[in-house]
Amino acid sequence: MRLASSARACGLAALLLFAAVSQASGAGSDWASIGAASYEPPKPAPAFTLPDLAGKAVTLADQRGKVTLVFFWATW
């Protein structure tokens, strides 16, 4: 809990600092002046099939509407 509250305090401090600098420079809502740009909306994940822990094939389409965590890892 202590770490979360200090992280929140740092985030708030950064936000206040950004707001102060933004107003002082007259930037206001001109995001291009700080190098910020809009982003492309996320694209859907490609269709894939993976085995579950029991070896049964599970497709991404089977998980539609469910919260799904997929861990990818490799050894190098």
Image: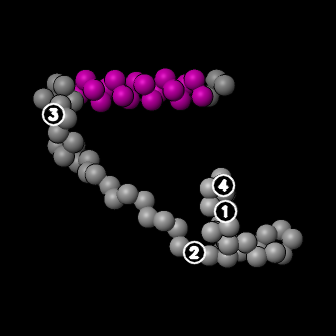
Element marked by disc 3: loop
Q: Residues within 10 Å of mark 2 (few under 14, many from 20)?
A: few
Q: Is residue 41 visible?
A: yes
Question: From what the image shows, is residue 50 above or below residue 40?
Answer: below
Q: Earlier in the sequence, mark 1 or mark 2?
A: 2
Q: Are marks 1 and 3 in contact (CB under 8 Å)?
A: no
Q: Amino acid at mark 2?
A: Ala
Q: Which residue is mark 2?
A: 47
Q: Residue at x 57, y 23 (%)?
A: 5
Element marked by disc 2: loop
Residue 27 badge: 3
- In three-dimensional space, the C-alpha distance between marks 3 and 2, rounded to whole angstroms, equals 43 Å
- In three-dimensional space, the C-alpha distance between marks 1 and 4, rounded to whole angstroms, equals 5 Å
Q: Which residue is mark 1?
A: 63
**Number of numbered callouts drawn:** 4
What residue range appears in magenta? 4-21
Task: Give the main secondary structure of the magenta stretch.
Answer: helix
Q: Are marks 3 and 2 in contact (CB under 8 Å)?
A: no
Q: Residues within 10 Å of mark 3 (few under 14, many from 20)?
A: some
Question: From what the image shows, is residue 50 above or below residue 13?
Answer: below
Q: Amino acid at mark 3?
A: Ala
Q: Are marks 1 and 4 in contact (CB under 8 Å)?
A: yes
**Placement of the N terminus among the 4 image quadrants:** top right
Q: Which residue is mark 4?
A: 66
Element marked by disc 1: helix
Q: Name the colouring of the figure.
A: one colour
Q: Residue at x 48, y 65 (%)?
A: 44
- In three-dimensional space, the C-alpha distance between marks 4 and 3, rounded to whole angstroms, equals 42 Å
Q: Residue at x 17, y 31 (%)?
A: 28
